[in-house]
Image: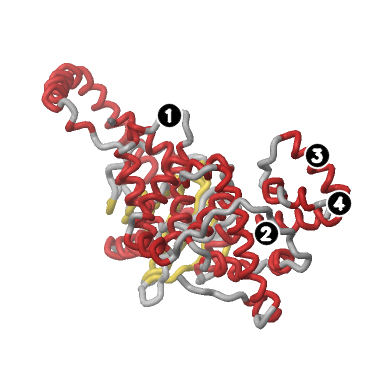
Amino acid sequence: MDLQSDSFEELAMPLFDQLYNFAHWLTQNRDDAEDLVQETYTKALKGFSSFRLGTNFRAWMYRILRNTFLTSRTGLKVTMTVPLDPEEDGPELAVESDTPETILFGRANRELLQSAIDELPVHFREILLLCEVEEMSYQEIAETLSIPIGTVMSRLSRARKTLSGRLRPQLQGGAGPAAIARGTNHGL
Amino acid sequence: MVCESWKAKLDTYVDGELPEAEMRTFDAHVRSCPSCSTDALTRVQMKRAIQVAGKRFTPSAEFRKRMQQSIAPKTRHSFRLGWMLAAAAAVVLVVGTLTSAYLGTRSSRDLAYRDQVFSEVADLHVATLASSSPVDVISTDRHTVKPWFQGKIPFAFDLPELQNSEFSLLGGRMTYLDQTPGAHLIYDARKHHISVFVFQERSLRLPAMSNEGSLSPKKLPFNMETWSQGGLRYFVVGDASAADIDSLSKLFKAAS
């Protein structure tokens, strides 16, 4: 038991910061994020004997965190009010030439982007964060979310399109350059 | 139109998830196709922007500590308790006799070393005050003194807010104890000067200092307080009253 919790601590604590960051993005609230991480670690420690060393520990921890979130009060509310879009593996459309990406990048408008990510449906938010922030491979994301790789690709693509679509009016519409520079801050 | 089939795979390409051979072919195409290279660039930029924006939340130190405690291995007292108690008793009986003499000498050696350290700290205090330039950074502002130490000593520490206290900061200087660099701060309290020394605990090679708190080192006309906190060893020494030394120590403990 002690050897087991020794190695659990060694494996799990290096993931603490990133798991917390992910939890906070999901719950959008510090207290709920702490509760979620706490519960994740408790569950993971209890189930550590079922974890097979040599397999992907990080994906295992994220899967526990995500499943815990989905069955939490906040998670249930989110999934009940925002139904998952049907997964479609249709062809991707070409990116329009006048896209917000370069504007966003050039102006380094982090807060604006954070607000846009905040407002994404949770299934888009989580897949974007796993891919871009956690730099997980498609295989790891598939393991974490328990979905096929094809679904990872299509969902990721849709998440990116949705994000770009939501940023476009803010960057090109009423916000104007001054507002873009300031950014908008939808507080959590 | 020719690029439609390429563009369908752009995301997979910028995510580095295409098979190796296909990645090479795609690389070659992107280099020769302005439209695809522009699209690839904008997607990479977006990925980077999300990566930066996504690293947004940091857990509090208090939560980290709580978590570490909750998953740290539990002490082994519940495991085969009876057997272990019996074994421990036997070990204590046998080993205790053999080691008591050794521990006695080690304990006296530790005490001697501790007294030597206290003595050196007191010497540093006196020698500094006797110097024509006791401080290298002269300021009453902790926000001036603290940054001055950056790059001079291999650690950072916090200075307390002294507003509404009887203490005032006179300045600071670098110091050495047992070949270890540290910070030396000088405070004034009712015309008495008090030195606060901060060193890295692990660099000092001090024996386990059970003697935390207020001390009156033998043969020294000073009051002194020492404690370890956050990996740092603090000494507060001066000819001020023990109460003043204690008050200043408490301010430091609260600030750290």
| Residue labelled with disc 1 | A53
Q: Quadrant of the N terminus of chain A?
A: top left
* Discs 2, 4: same chain: yes
Q: Position of residue B154 (x, y in %)?
A: 55, 48
The Cα atoms of the two marked residues, 2 and 4, are separated by 20 Å
For this view, does A106 lie left or right of residue B79?
right
| Residue labelled with disc 4 | B33
Badge 2 crowding class, 10 Å Cα cut-off, few under 14, some 14 to 19, many 20 or more, is many
**SS class, disc 1:** loop
Question: Residue at 73% across / 66% down in the picture?
Answer: A99
Q: Position of residue B200 (x, y in %)?
A: 46, 46
Tell me whether circle 1 and circle 3 mark residues in contact (CB < 8 Å).
no
The amino acid on which the numbered mark 4 sits, given as a three-letter code, is Cys
* Discs 1, 2: same chain: no
- Residue lying furthest bottom in this view? A174
Question: Residue at 30% across / 36% down in the picture?
Answer: B73
Q: Chain of mark 4?
A: B
Q: Is residue B15 visible?
A: yes
| Residue labelled with disc 2 | B46
| Residue labelled with disc 3 | B25
Q: Which mark is residue A146?
A: none
* Discs 1, 3: same chain: no
Q: Earlier in the sequence, mark 3 or mark 2?
A: 3
Badge 1 crowding class, 10 Å Cα cut-off, few under 14, some 14 to 19, many 20 or more, is few
Q: Chain of mark 2?
A: B
